[in-house]
Image: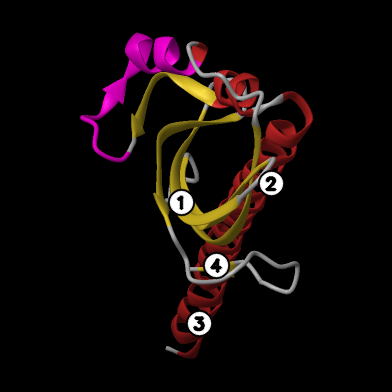
């Protein structure tokens, strides 16, 4: 009888070990995806500052991406690309800072949100944004939905910390 009990105890601990290792790998995969997606959002903002908002948007939008803009119906896919292409972004610089993010359990979709700053020659406007990201077959993240709202009542600063949900 004791041999059976010992056998079941060993099998139990063996299965628990496998289960914990699988759970750890899944969490590691998810955390890596979350970090990659957040870095993509930061890179996207840096790219906007380097080459302009229009070029950055065209580089980071998925083919079926959707833009939500104030006082407008949603613009999707080719219409979104056409809208971006028509933008004149030579009179301002748009940058943003992610404040929070989360990624799906499957580690292939997620969102970031934060604050943005649009600096023109004579004014600076602040607002909030949310971007929904999808991991592409090649491993890169592209946005599938982007939206922003003007006004925050404050300014962006480097002391703000990203929150992970």
Mark with earlier residue (2, 4): 2
Mark with earlier residue (3, 2): 3
Q: Is residue 11 above or below residue 89?
A: below
| Disc 3 target residue | 9
Q: Position of residue 53 (x, y in %)?
A: 61, 29
Mark 3 packing: few (<14 Cα in 10 Å), some, or many (20+)?
few
- Residue at 50 percent across and 45 percent down: it is 107
Q: Nearer the viewer, residue 65 or 147?
A: 147
Q: Nearer the viewer, residue 25 or 58?
A: 58
Range of magenta residues: 70-84
Residue 129 marker? 1
Task: Give the quadrant of the N terminus.
Answer: bottom left
The secondary element bearing badge 1 is classed as strand
Q: Position of residue 116 (x, y in %)?
A: 57, 52
Mark with earlier residue (4, 1): 1
Kindly report the distance in space between the C-alpha atoms of the residues bearing marks 3 and 2: 49 Å
Kindly report the distance in space between the C-alpha atoms of the residues bearing marks 2 and 4: 15 Å
Whether residue 73 appears in magenta in the rendering, the answer is yes
Observer-side mark, 2 or 4, equals: 2
- Residue at 46 percent across and 51 percent down: it is 129
Mark with earlier residue (1, 2): 2
- Residue at 73 percent across and 32 percent down: it is 47
Residue 165 marker? none
Mark 2 packing: few (<14 Cα in 10 Å), some, or many (20+)?
some
Q: Is residue 140 above or below residue 124?
A: above
Observer-side mark, 4 or 3, equals: 4
* Image side of residue 157 versus residue 109, left or right: right
| Disc 2 target residue | 42
| Disc 4 target residue | 164
The secondary element bearing badge 3 is classed as helix
The reply to whether discs 1 and 2 touch (Cβ–Cβ < 8 Å) is no
Q: Position of residue 60 (x, y in %)?
A: 57, 26
């Amino acid at each position: 009888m004791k041999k059976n009990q010992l056998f079941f105890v060993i099998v139990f601990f063996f299965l628990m070990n496998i289960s914990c290792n699988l759970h750890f790998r899944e969490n590691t995969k998810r955390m890596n995806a979350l970090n990659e997606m957040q870095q993509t959002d930061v890179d996207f903002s840096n790219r906007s500052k380097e080459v302009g908002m229009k070029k950055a948007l065209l580089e980071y939008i998925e083919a079926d991406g959707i833009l939500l803009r104030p006082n407008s119906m949603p613009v999707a896919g080719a219409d979104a690309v056409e809208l971006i292409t028509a933008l004149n972004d030579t009179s301002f610089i748009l940058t943003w800072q992610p404040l929070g993010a989360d990624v799906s359990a499957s580690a292939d979709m997620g969102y970031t949100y934060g604050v943005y700053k649009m600096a023109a020659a004579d004014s600076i406007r602040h607002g909030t944004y949310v971007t929904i990201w999808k991991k592409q077959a090649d491993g890169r993240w592209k946005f599938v939905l982007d939206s922003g709202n003007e006004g925050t009542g404050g300014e962006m600063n480097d002391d703000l910390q990203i929150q992970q949900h």
